[in-house]
Amino acid sequence: MSDSSKDSQSFDFDQMELKSDIPIHRPASETPNEPKAGRSRDKTPSRMPLVLVSLLFLAAAGAAYYFFLEAARLGEQLADSKRLSADTQENLTVTHQSLAQSEKQITTLTRQLGDAQAKLAEMEALTKNLDADSKSRLADLKKREKALAEVRGKRDALRKELDQAQASLKKVTLERDSSRTALAEVQKEHREKQAAWEQEKQTLNQSYEVNLKRLRQEADAAGDRLAAAEQTASRMEALRKKDSEAGLALAQENTQLKSRLETAKQDRERLRRERDQIEEQLGKTKAQLGVYTGKLVPFSENVGGLRLLFREPLPDDVKFPRRQAPILVRALISDTGAVEKAFIAKDQQIEGPLAQAVIRAAYRYKFSPPTLEGKQVKCWHAFLIGPE
């Protein structure tokens, strides 16, 4: 403040002569002011304004250079930001494309899984039909075998009767031969004693005719029985051959049905393997998307839900032993809260009707759906079943 006062007092800027390379044109009327009386004047020109102007120019140049450098740095940052934004946008586009492709693949695999399950259901229905048809044919075959056994029994009885008829015929033939021999002897005796035994001859002749007629009738009857037995044997033999052929045809048909059943079972196993592969691939694809509805997750404190909603009591005829502790059951809880799988935990030694009743009751338990990250999931869970 004092320096500027001194400068203003010692220098008269109005009377200062400024030197410059640029010519100054002044009007002719203008004349330099005359110095006032009573003041001392210094004729030496001052360089202070030039220094100030130079300093201001240097400051302005420095500021401009700083602003230029700052603008260049900001431009580089802006270019880097634009490149980073472009890379981020490109990565986001690739991610969206990958997500769309994964969803499309999930849709395709889900449809394939549905088709495979439909085919498996058809094959299981066909297998059931083939099993029922095979059982029906097997039952029919057993009935025919039983009927064939009965026919064979009747045939054996007829054969036995035929053997008896043949033995009787043989006996009658022997009796006839004996009678003929006796007749010859009687005729010889009759010729020798014809005169003496005429009356006796007549009696013997009558007796002979009667016996001969009786023997012929018995022989004819035995022959008829033999013919009937032979016809019956022939008919039974034909029936046996027919039943044998029918049994062979049934056996062949049963073999074919068993072959078809085995083929159907192989196709069912193949479809099950394909279904398992598709489910595994679908699970891997879904695993890339994180937690989803219906996913099987390990039990942890982050899993919510699993509140018991319904408990199935044990049947009245199933009694817990007096010192039996409650039974620990491990179960797979579905995303709807139902029990999909259940088994008794190890090292409990529960067997017989009690174990079966506990498992049947466990399958009827109902829980609130397990949740993780806001999605309904599957989870293994353990609970106790004890006496009421």
Image (cartoon, rainbow, N blue to C red):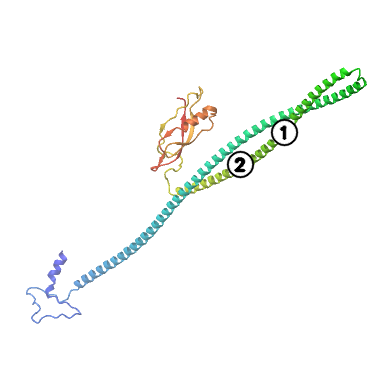
Q: Secondary structure at mark 1?
A: helix
Name the one closer to the observer, 343 or 246: 246
Q: Position of residue 349 (x, y in %)?
A: 54, 29
Measure how far apart labels 1 and 2 are at the Cα level. Answer: 39 Å
Name the one closer to the observer, 226 or 78: 226
Q: Position of residue 196 (x, y in %)?
A: 91, 17
Above or below, comparing residue 384 to residue 17 in the picture: above
Residue drawn at point x = 53 percent, y = 27 percent: 353
Give the residue pinned by disc 1.
231
Name the amino acid, label 2.
Answer: Lys
Q: First in sequence, mark 1 or 2: give its number.
A: 1
Can residue 3 be seen? yes
Give the residue pinned by disc 2.
258
**In the displayed structure, does residue 153 sit left or right of residue 203?**
left
Above or below, comparing residue 194 to residue 156 in the picture: above
Determine the residue located farthest toward the left in the rendered image. Answer: 37
Q: Position of residue 80 (x, y in %)?
A: 36, 62
Determine the residue located farthest toward the bottom in the rendered image. Answer: 28
Q: Residues within 10 Å of mark 2 (few under 14, many from 20)?
A: some
Residue drawn at point x = 59 percent, y = 38 percent: 134
Name the one closer to the observer, 239 or 346: 239
Residue drawn at point x = 70 percent, y = 35 percent: 235
Q: Are marks 1 and 2 in contact (CB under 8 Å)?
A: no
**In the displayed structure, does residue 292 sit left or right of residue 258?**
left
Name the amino acid, label 1.
Answer: Gln
In which image quadrant can residue 338 be found? top left
